């Protein structure tokens, strides 16, 4: 499961350093080339809820195998593409495969491990995602510089094939799939288009202008379709894409709201810090990708650490501490100035990376375990959709602030705005996510630490 996540996460960031080469090879500008990344992310984010519902309904292993086949097959098609249109279509199709794989992976991972180890499951998956995101720019840069950017795609196929074989051979779980009437195709269409229109509008609004008639029309169409989705779901009952018991779970909905607010931070930093390093510091694309390692590396490590902490302390302390680190990290980075050396960015990136690792792994586990086990894949899909939606909205807001002035001044103001969103997300987590803090767990951790210290002293004596 971790290997499959590594492939998906690596694919999100590996192509960021390959865009200039793709532009040269196909003779296109950056506005077109960026859809190699944006198209994949949009399709992935829009369809992931449907992928989660499908995995819970017809079986997670089956949906994982289908998604991996789609992902690997269209990776090969992207690698051999002869023009930009084929590449973009292949990338969108890879997003479909990823949207089927990710929630199925989450559902299977939580099913493989016993319930007391749920925190470990979340830490393992999000840690692997952090590792994949960190390796992406480095691996993508190496492959682009030596053989070709096409090998970023070719590499996906054998790794995905091995992950499929390992899952088929070793992952034997009791599926919680259950039939609840016909699949909610109308709901899928309504939420998919309802999310797609505003996400495209947010992506294009900075270039075309927020008052452009087409941009405004997409926002209106998205709002109408999302309202229609609500009506469709109310009439669909138990066969709805998002069933009533999911919407009625206050802890789960609070987790979604917290993720929605927090995700503006991570996405904005991923986009704008490399731009600062490239335009402000004169770094190459590969150097800018490597410059994010203090954040991405601590993200991966903190995710792995979050699992044992979750098991010892419970969800609320880990979620809230992670949210606090996110807020503090973005405040530190908001003081960025035009004369800052790279080294001054490192403390903020490290604090931010710790927050990302602790928050996302623990809140994913808290949200998945808040629902019935048969909803695990759907829960993971909804949480990730909130992450994509929050990140996209946050990027739109950040871009509007940044383009209104110079890069460094705009970044400072945008990051302060993100800090306000983080404070709101932290408040939601404190009030409603993860139940109450268990004082006995905290006391037990202190006693355990004290006994370990005494044992060490005795050993020294």
Image (cartoon, grey):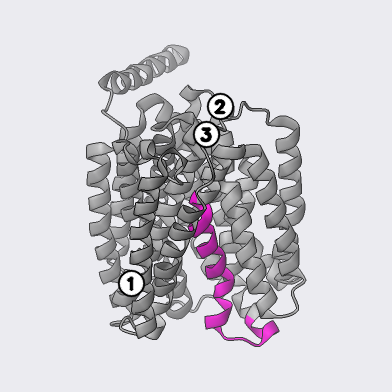
Q: Which residues are magenta?
A: 23-49
Nearer the observer: mark 1 or 3; the answer is 1
Relative to 54, residue 135 above or below: below
**Residue 253 magenta-highlighted:** no
Q: Could you say which disc has been placed on residue 113 in the image?
A: 2
Which quadrant would the N terminus be assigned to in this image? top right
Please tell me whether mark 2 sits on a helix, a strand or a loop.
loop
User: Residue 77's image quarter?
Assistant: bottom right
- Give the x, y percent position of residue 325: 32, 48
Q: Answer whether labels 3 and 2 touch (C-beta < 8 Å).
A: yes
Residues at marks 3 and 2, CA–CA distance in whole angstroms? 7 Å
Nearer the observer: mark 1 or 2; the answer is 1
Q: Earlier in the sequence, mark 1 or mark 3?
A: 3
- Give the x, y percent position of residue 163: 71, 43
Q: Answer whether labels 1 and 2 touch (C-beta < 8 Å).
A: no
- Relative to 211, 360 lies left or right: right
Please tell me whether mark 3 sits on a helix, a strand or a loop.
helix
Q: Write down the residue under mark 1.
A: 220
- Give the x, y percent position of residue 214: 39, 82
- Relative to 448, 459 lies left or right: right
Residues at marks 1 and 3, CA–CA distance in whole angstroms? 39 Å
Relative to 339, residue 104 above or below: above
Q: Earlier in the sequence, mark 1 or mark 2?
A: 2
User: Is residue 158 visible from the viewing direction of this image?
Assistant: yes
Residue at the spot x=44%, y=30% of the render? 372
Residue at the spot x=39%, y=38% of the render? 367
Assess disc 3: are there few (<14), some (14-19) or many (≥20) residues with their C-alpha within 10 Å of its C-alpha: many
């Amino acid at each position: 499961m971790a290997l499959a996540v590594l492939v998906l996460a690596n694919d999100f960031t590996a192509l960021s350093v390959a865009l200039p080469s793709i532009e040269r090879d196909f003779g296109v500008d950056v506005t077109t080339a960026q859809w190699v990344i944006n198209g994949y992310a949009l399709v992935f984010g829009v369809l992931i809820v449907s992928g989660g519902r499908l995995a819970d309904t017809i079986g997670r292993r089956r949906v994982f195998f289908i998604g991996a086949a789609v992902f690997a097959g269209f990776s090969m098609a992207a690698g051999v593409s002869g023009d930009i249109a084929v590449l973009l279509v292949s990338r969108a199709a890879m997003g479909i495969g990823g949207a089927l794989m990710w929630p199925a992976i989450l559902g299977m991972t939580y099913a493989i491990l016993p319930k007391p180890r749920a925190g470990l499951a979340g830490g393992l998956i999000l840690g692997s995602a952090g590792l994949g995101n960190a390796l992406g720019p480095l691996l993508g840069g190496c492959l682009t510089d030596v053989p070709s950017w096409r090998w970023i795609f070719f590499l996906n196929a054998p790794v995905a094939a091995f992950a499929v074989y390992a899952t088929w051979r070793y992952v034997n779980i009791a599926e919680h799939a259950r039939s609840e009437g016909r699949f909610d195709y109308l709901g899928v269409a309504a939420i998919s288009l309802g999310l797609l229109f505003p996400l495209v509008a947010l992506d294009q609004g900075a270039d075309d202008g927020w008052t452009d008639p087409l941009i405004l029309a997409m926002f209106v169409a998205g709002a109408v379709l999302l309202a229609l989705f609500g009506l469709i779901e109310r009439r669909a009952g138990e066969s709805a894409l998002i069933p009533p018991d999911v919407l009625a779970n206050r802890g789960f909905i609070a987790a979604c709201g917290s993720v929605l607010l927090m995700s503006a931070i991570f996405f904005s930093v991923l986009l704008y810090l490399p731009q600062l390093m490239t335009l402000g510091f004169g770094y190459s694309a590969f150097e800018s990708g490597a410059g994010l390692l203090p954040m991405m590396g601590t993200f991966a490590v903190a995710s792995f650490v979050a699992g044992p902490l979750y098991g010892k302390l419970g969800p609320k302390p880990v979620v809230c501490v992670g949210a606090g680190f996110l807020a503090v990290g973005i405040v530190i980075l908001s003081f960025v100035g035009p004369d800052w050396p790279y080294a001054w960015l490192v403390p903020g990136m490290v604090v931010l990376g710790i927050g990302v690792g602790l928050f996302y792994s623990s809140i994913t586990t808290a949200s998945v375990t808040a629902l019935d086990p048969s909803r695990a894949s759907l829960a993971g899909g909804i949480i990730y959709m909130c992450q994509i939606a929050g990140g996209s909205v946050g990027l739109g807001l950040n871009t509007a602030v940044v383009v209104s002035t110079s890069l460094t001044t705009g970044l400072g103001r945008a990051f302060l705005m993100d800090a306000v969103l983080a404070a709101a997300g932290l408040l939601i987590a404190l009030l409603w996510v993860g139940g109450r803090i268990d004082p006995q767990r905290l006391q037990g951790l202190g006693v355990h630490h004290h006994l370990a210290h005494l044992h060490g002293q005795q050993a020294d004596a």
